[in-house]
Image (spheres, rainbow, N blue to C red):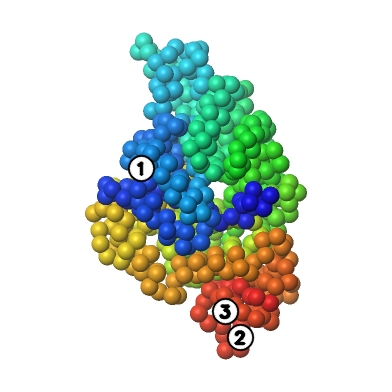
Amino acid sequence: QASRDWWRDAIIYQVYIRSFADGNGDGEGDIAGLRDRLPYLRDLGVDALWINPWYPSPLNDGGYDVADFRDIDPRFGDLTQAKALLDEAHGLGLRILLDIVPNHSSWEHAWFKEALAAPPGSPERARYIFRDGTGPNGDQPPNNWRSVFGGPAWERVTEPDGSPGQWYFHIFDVSQPDFDWSNPEVRAEFLDVLRFWFDLGVDGFRIDVAHGMVKDMTMPDLPYDESGLLDRPSIADHPFFDREGVHEIYRGWRELADSYDPPRLYVAEAWVHPPERLARYLRDDELHSAFNFDYLKSAWDAQDLRRSIDESITVLASVGAPATWVLENHDVERVVTRYGRGATAAGDGSARTATGPVDEQLGLRRARAAALLMLALPGGAYIYQGQELGLPEVLDLPEDSLQDPVWERSGHTERGRDGCRVPLPWTVDGPSSGFGADGSWLPQPAGWGARSVEAADADQASLLHLYRAALRTRREVVPAAEPLSWIEGVGSDVVAFRRGSGFACVVNLGAEPAVLPEHRSILLTSAELTDDGRLPGDAAAWLAL
Ligand code: TEU
């Protein structure tokens, strides 16, 4: 049973493959580069990897626009290399999760091309959401739904005979048509895709937009304000997010995962709130875990963090699910930058809207403390590539290098998500700081090599060394089965808790030094305590009691 439940406190490293390591020198990361760096990941001390989409794709949305769910984009490698990667990773004790994108495909997917070539009302169209337009000539969209990426969520097509035609629905980019999940053919297809990768040896999936898929097919209009935002923060009974019908799909997926030996794992990417809604995805016969985005969005503030931690643990316990902490991913602003903005800024984590001056040194101190906090909490956690190096968001990428769909909204253009996707620096010098080629698909800023793995290796005080020490120490001294119990009376800017009787974590989010409980040994984020043995501000400590 113990080995079956490996995921309950697993630390999983997110590989954004296009930016991780470039094995063939074409400026884009690939499977070959990842295979070369597996020992680095094993030495870091993580349990598993989650690899962002590597399927054939025009990459309009970083690969979340999938043209073929059963193959690998040639720029990343092929199925033979994927198999070799799985074998090598397993040999090193690392499990591998892939990313499944069930809400939509690319408009280059064979099914969508067939849909465009077939007439309205055909079975080919019924795999997606095609509707006639409104207005006298059908030249108005079927309803007022808007895309998450801005603008209308409907696009008009030209019929095979050349006449202006139907409209199709896309929650995201126009190149990402949504599937119709009320169609049994779509359901069967995805079960088959899951089987394809499980049979190859994949250990599980991160489910993209896990709260999407099912739509209200009566298609009621939504209340948007003039700038295109919903006029209230959350809509009960939203017509395309977090609908009841999605749970039935996951019960079928779980049955499939459980039919394998060892059983396979699912983690949900579901931006739903409050935690009670998220917990519904984690019932016994549904998904195993879900990213905790409420935690990611919490400010660098003791009360806010403590409330968010408490709430998640309590709610998830009611369904027997572990918490899954996350501070960074390929969609949000890097934590050094986020926590380096002013006093407590965190907002919604969005890289697109955050503004204001960044104190990088402050952000880095907080990122170090945040690492010890996250890794001491009960449950599992995800680490996004480069987080262990303390990479900041790259805020000044040259305009002509930007790739992410740009979001026109609220009357201004928002920044895309490229700033957290810049290729990793591996060496101090050399072409693209050891990433692989002379030049990379997103340019690395000047001085990137100083933030490299090589530089961090050489500096005992680096965040990389802290992550390694924390991941090792975690196995040795943080009792996985012990719940969290808060230590009270430590001051309003301090978060402190015990796990069992022998371990404590203290995080000081304020400016005043904090008193530490008596302890035998200690792992610290900052080099020194104050002269009288107190913990400085924006620092954390792990204590063996
Ligand atoms: O993101 C889902 C999603 O809802 C995002 O729009 C998220 O809310 C936003 O990026 C937070 O800033 C997933 C993928 O992680 C993202 O990269 C894709 O663009 C998206 O799905 C569409 O597949």
Asked whether, in this view, residue 11 is left or right of residue 457, the answer is right
Of the residues shown, which amino acid type is indicated by label 1?
A: Phe
Relative to 474, residue 383 above or below: above
Does ligand 1 reach within 8 Å of label 1's beta carbon? no
Quarter of the image holding residue 487? bottom right
Q: Please tell me how crowded label 1 is: few (under 14), some (14-19), or many (20+) other residues with Cα within 10 Å.
A: many
Which secondary structure, mark 1? loop
- Image quadrant assignment for residue 238: top right
Residue ID at (61%, 85%) = 533
The residue carrying pointer 2 sits among few (fewer than 14), some (14 to 19) or many (20 or more) residues within 10 Å by Cα, namely: few
CA–CA distance in space, label 2 to label 1: 51 Å
Q: Quadrant of residue 74?
A: top left
Mark number for residue 536?
A: 3
**Mark closest to the chain's N terminus, 1 or 3:** 1
Residue 347 at what x, y percent from top left?
A: 55, 56
Report the residue marked by disc 1.
76
> Which residue is drawn at the image coordinates 44% and 19% (left, top)?
115
Q: Which residue is mark 2?
A: 533
Residue 78 percent across, percent down from the top left? 36, 38
Return the x and y of residue 302 as percentages of the image width and height.
64, 67
Q: Residues within 10 Å of mark 3 (few under 14, many from 20)?
A: many
Name the amino acid, label 2. Gly
Contact, mark 3 vs mark 2 (Cβ under 8 Å): no
